[in-house]
Image: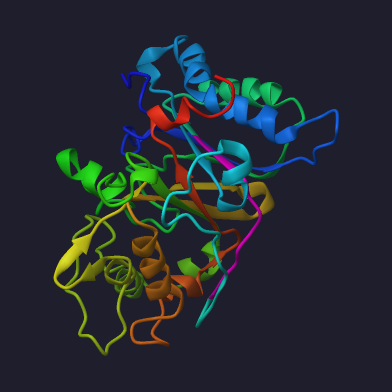
Amino acid sequence: MIPPGDLIQTVNGGTAYATFLTLVLAASTPLFNASSIAANVIGATNDLTRNVAVRSWSHNLAVTVGIGANAWDQLTGLPRPAELRPFEAINGSQYAPATPGDIFYHIRSDRPDLPFEFERQLIDQFNGSVKVQDKVTGFRYFDARALQGFVDGTSNPVGSLIDPATRVNGSIDPNGAGGSYLLTQKYSVNLDKWNQLPTDQQEKVFGRTKPDNIELPDQAPADQKPHKQLTTVIVNGTQHDIVRDNMPFGDPSEDEFGCFFIGYSAAVWVLQQMLDNMFIGVPPGKYDRLLDFTAAETGNYWFVPSLEMLLTIGGN
């Protein structure tokens, strides 16, 4: 059971279902203050989570809310966390777009009706103050595999290592203390093209064996590196971890297949370095070959307030 309370303590929970909801603020009028209404709903997120989770504590409803840089001031009125900034498109060897988004909800559970009910009540509470920019409903695929058949998220920190990787250190940034930076990207996956690649070549792209998830040796600095190596950020001998909770999504009848990437970090620069490694390459030009089979369709940075900070937002 995941107890209600701190909204980012459960990011490593590995639930079976998730909804990824990106919202933009509606226009305000003299008689309709969209920012004020939305702020009140955001500040009451923990109460709504409890009210829905009580229907089945054992199925682990957990909710994270993130706020974008462009909406931070009007939604919170709080000092800005030091690294909070808009996502900027990457025009490297491959392209990563920046897309609109003011508020983001990561809603997850071990049964699909709880995220559905949370979302239903959430949208009712927003009462027209937001518009849905993008929504993805994801699912855990077999033993936490991506649609390409490889285990996903195995490099996540565990136990006592989660907090240093995901929570902002208040002694470094008092404005962000206890919160987390969040990167979200929706990727489409070309499964037909991927499945034409022999398994041994797929393993070179990922940097792991496909059946049993064994890491392959890292490549030399000047050589083409696998996805696993490019997404590991090491600076001056120190590895800077993030927590991923990616999920596949799709509709076979529409030939739609994809992955929603979601990564929590104590620092935006770690997330940005990972993206630069992937889309520009190390060295430049030797980009992540997984991008030959996937395409980023969205891109956003968010700040996830700590529970203490969250409860100060709006009139709650």
Q: How many marks?
A: 0
Question: For this rendering, which residue is in front, 115 or 273?
Answer: 273
Residue at (42% x, 76% y) in the render? 289
Q: Is residue 207 magenta?
A: no
Residue 101 appears left or right of 63: right
| Residue 288, horizontal then vertical, whole percent | 40, 75
Residue 32 appears left or right of 66: right
Q: Is residue 168 above or below residue 228?
A: above
Residue at (37% x, 64% y) in the render? 269
Residue at (30% x, 46% y) in the render? 166
Quarter the N terminus occupies: top left
As drawn, which residue projects farthest toward the top?
55
Residue span colored magenta: 95-106
Q: Is residue 73 above or below residue 308?
A: below
Figure quadrant of residue 207: bottom left
Residue 245 visible in the current orientation? no
| Residue 70, horizontal then vertical, whole percent | 61, 52
| Residue 80, horizontal then vertical, whole percent | 48, 48
Q: Is residue 102 magenta?
A: yes
As drawn, which residue projects farthest toward the bottom?
222
As drawn, which residue projects farthest toward the right?
30
Residue 113 visible in the current orientation? yes
Question: For this rendering, which residue is in front, 142 or 266?
Answer: 266
Figure quadrant of residue 258: bottom right
Question: For this rendering, which residue is in front, 185 or 48?
Answer: 48
Q: Is residue 89 above or below residue 155?
A: below
Quarter the C terminus occupies: top right
Residue 39 appears left or right of 143: right
Q: Which of the colour schemes (rainbow, by chain, secondary structure, one colour) is used?
A: rainbow
Q: Is residue 65 above or below residue 85?
A: above
